[in-house]
Image (cartoon, rainbow, N blue to C red):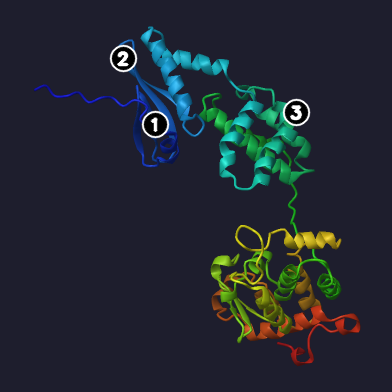
Amino acid sequence: MAASKKRHPINALTAVQVRNLKAPGRYADGNGLYLVVDPSGARRWLLRIMVKGRRRDIGLGSAVLIPLAEARDAAMRLRKVAREGGDPVLERDREKLRDIPTFKTAAETVHEAQKASWKNAKHRNQWINTLITYAYPHIGERTVDQIETPDILKVLAPIWLSKPETAGRVRQRMRTVLDWAKAAGYREGDNPVDAVAGGLPKQPEKVRHHAALPYQQVPEFMKTLQGSASSLIVKHAFEFLILTAARTGEARFARWDEVSADKRLWTIPASRMKAGREHRVPLSDRCSAILTEAASYRGDSPYLFPGMSKEGTLSDMVFTKILRSLNIPATAHGFRSSFRDWASETTSYPNEVAEMALAHTISNKVEAAYRRGDLLEKRREMMNDWGNYCEATGSDKAGGQSASSERDD
């Protein structure tokens, strides 16, 4: 009995498999078309056919950039060329020469391919808009194989010093587009963006600070905040943020299971801290009063200050909106600086106590190695004084530190 012949696969792969296959290997789609997954994780198309009696392997490009249907169409065209006695490699190269895209077309192709992976809609729009504004006027209509370093320099030079951050983003995005062009076979050699640095001046180092309200104005702001038209939850959250000198994300995501009411302590887990270490925050009288009021609208939410976002928390823009509505030229994060200036200029608490309250990392490695405690009780006194200062008005604002705390520690 003759052995049955094993049938070759036809259209064996799916688009989902092409996106998700990660194990290195060669996966047959049929008719000589293969998806090759390299050990690095890169995925590419390979066509194996007979050309004039000899087996040839022809690369068709990246599977990230060329969808399955397009790879099948290309494979069919090249098989037809081979059957008719032609050279499919030469035909492939001719097709590329005929279809070399402009920078604009390439940028839009890359943007379309990558935007699904960007969750932030604002970032998706900014990515292409920066290229439209700054790159297209110079290189938008040039084919990607003709773009060289002097062309990149023309794009970046006008904004390199005046808009350094924007220039850096434009450079990175042009590099991504031209890397794609090389991977797709539209250009050869090094990326011209990588060589442009030698033709640009050194950008001045610029330290960005969050705009902060002078600490002298914080008590008046607290009074204005309490009388504002914002919801009670938002006002409580903002007060709590200022009184604890916390970061905005730490306050917005604060949970009831992190609070010990009897110990008047808020313990933020390491997973939610910038430095990756648990941080204990002593709660002042006003903070305790806020939490007592917050319990009345708690419901079944795990958060101290529930909101309407997808996570059930307050929006990341909620504090900014309040400041804008009150015409306050500061950021919510800047109140940490207000607290730090108050502690330095009006109290005699040691610097390390204030730094510990801000959960700053100790830069001195030797000191960090010997520092075991978190100065909780000293910080408790300081945060009570800060709370009293923030709640004071008029002549009550004169002192920053209570009489019981006026000592040289």
Numbered disc in front, either 2 or 1: 1
Query: Is 238 on the left or on the right of 29, as rendered?
Result: right
Label 1 or label 3, whichever comes before in sequence order: 1
Q: CA distance from mark 1 to mark 3?
A: 38 Å
Label 2 or label 1, whichever comes before in sequence order: 1
Q: Secondary structure at mark 1?
A: strand
Query: Is 6 on the left or on the right of 391, as rendered?
Result: left
Q: Residue at x 75, y 89 (%)?
A: 405
The circle drawn on residue 35 is: 1
Which residue is farthest bottom? 404
Other-residue count near label 1 (Cα within 10 Å), few / some / many at <14 / 14–19 / ≥20 = many
Percent of width and height locating residue 311:
60, 60
Q: Quadrant of residue 268?
A: bottom right
Location of mark 3 (residue): 137
In this rendering, the answer to whether 48 lies above or below 390 is: above
Q: How many marks?
A: 3
Location of mark 2 (residue): 54
Q: Residue at x 64, y 63 (%)?
A: 313
Q: Residue at x 22, y 26 (%)?
A: 6
